Amino acid sequence: MPIPQTMTYVHANGAGDPSVLGLATGPVPQPKPDEVLIRVQAAGVNRPDIAQRQGSYPPPPGASPILGLEVAGEVVAAGDRVTTLSIGDRVCALTNGGGYAQYCTAPATQCLPWPTGYDAIRAGALPETAFTVWANLFQHGRLTKGETALIHGGSSGIGVTAIQFAHAFGARVFVTAGSDEKCAACLKLGADAAINYRTHDFADEVKALTEGRGVDVVLDMVGAPYMARNIRSLGMDGRLVMIAFLQGSKAPEFDFLPVMLRRLTITGSTMRPRTTAQKGAIAAELRTKVWPLLDAGQCAPPIHATFPMVRAAEAHQLMESSQHIGKIVLSVD
């Protein structure tokens, strides 16, 4: 199939609510020497897309201004330095932007093959959460077999991925979620305990579940309101890993004494500003350690809903409502 000169993509007409999203036509991007051009069949919807649409998470220099950080599709062109992929390969990719479109470029090192038995929708739901969870829960958080993790937002895209990865690698997993239905879904995915944060104090529940010892790792995307309780939930040598601040980043009058007394580590990261080499290193670990699990039918991302690209605004509305359990994906015609 010849590559056209123009393509359809989702355009944000300024910063604002989901109503600013609509379809537009623009040029097909050209791959750089280390990139491939992907004919997109599916694009995952993620919280950073919401933040970018609202104007609080601008793309880094040189990245596409089009929304979308993960895609699945077919390689249709490659830069002259690409040696690991061929025309026709089916890949899913962590992009630097541009995913809500018929065509998207991505560094070849940030591409991974579709796992065995996957279609485009399921493959398109993998990269952003897989890269984020692996980098933060396992690299920064150093979660290992036999340890215990507390994962906030257990029913989110990040949450369902973190539950399954942690469980598969032999950790004990506690989660928080905002309803009994979401808690039940987390238990089915492999969580050992699920805490409804609307009806229970999660720090008290963690202390009871661990007989006062606390957990080894907390993965948090809520931010300031959870800071003190996250610290209370950690055991000796525990690690708090922060990946977002959905409810703010400034915690007033925080007492750091427990950090010293229990030798705690507070860390965090973002994915998008990392270099291609850094993201490629994460991709290489995923391919070696996680992709065999996916090929064997484990840790598949639960898909809550799919929307055609023309209904991207509805997909954003659903994500902002937090009524979903698992991933939201755009299908791209």
Image (cartoon, grey):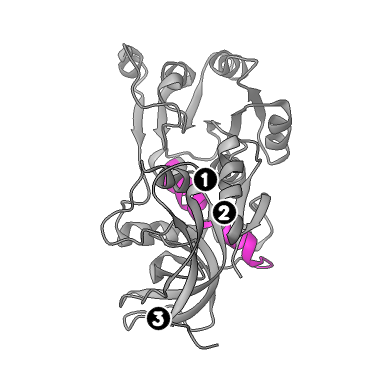
Q: Nearer the viewer, residue 235 or 159?
A: 159
Which of pointers 1 and 3 indicates the residue nearer the eye?
1
Q: Which residue is mark 3?
A: 78
Q: Residue 141's x, y, as percent?
A: 42, 37
Task: Name the disc covering residue 18, or none.
Answer: 1
Q: Which residues are magenta?
A: 116-136
* Magenta residues, dominant SS class: helix
First of labels 2, 1 by sequence position: 1
Relative vertical location of residue 26 with respect to residue 183 in this rendering, above or below:
below
Q: In screen coordinates, is 162 left or right of 224?
A: right
Q: Residue 213's x, y, as percent?
A: 52, 17
Q: Which residue is mark 2?
A: 312
Say which amino acid is labelled 2: Ala
Picture residue at 63% right of the left edge, 26% below the top: 178
Residue 292 appears anywhere in the view: no
First of labels 2, 3 by sequence position: 3
Say which amino acid is labelled 3: Ala
Question: Alpha carbon of mark 2 to alpha carbon of mark 3: how far?
Answer: 28 Å
Say which amino acid is labelled 1: Pro
Picture residue at 40% right of the left edge, 71% below the top: 108
Residue located farthest toward the left when viewing the structure as drawn: 61
Relative vertical location of residue 31 with respect to residue 321 in this rendering, above or below:
below
**Circles 1, 3 touching at the beta carbon (< 8 Å):** no
Structural crowding at the residue carrying mark 3, measured as other residues with C-alpha within 10 Å and reported as few (<14), some (14–19) or many (≥20)? many
Relative vertical location of residue 332 with respect to residue 87 in this rendering, above or below:
above
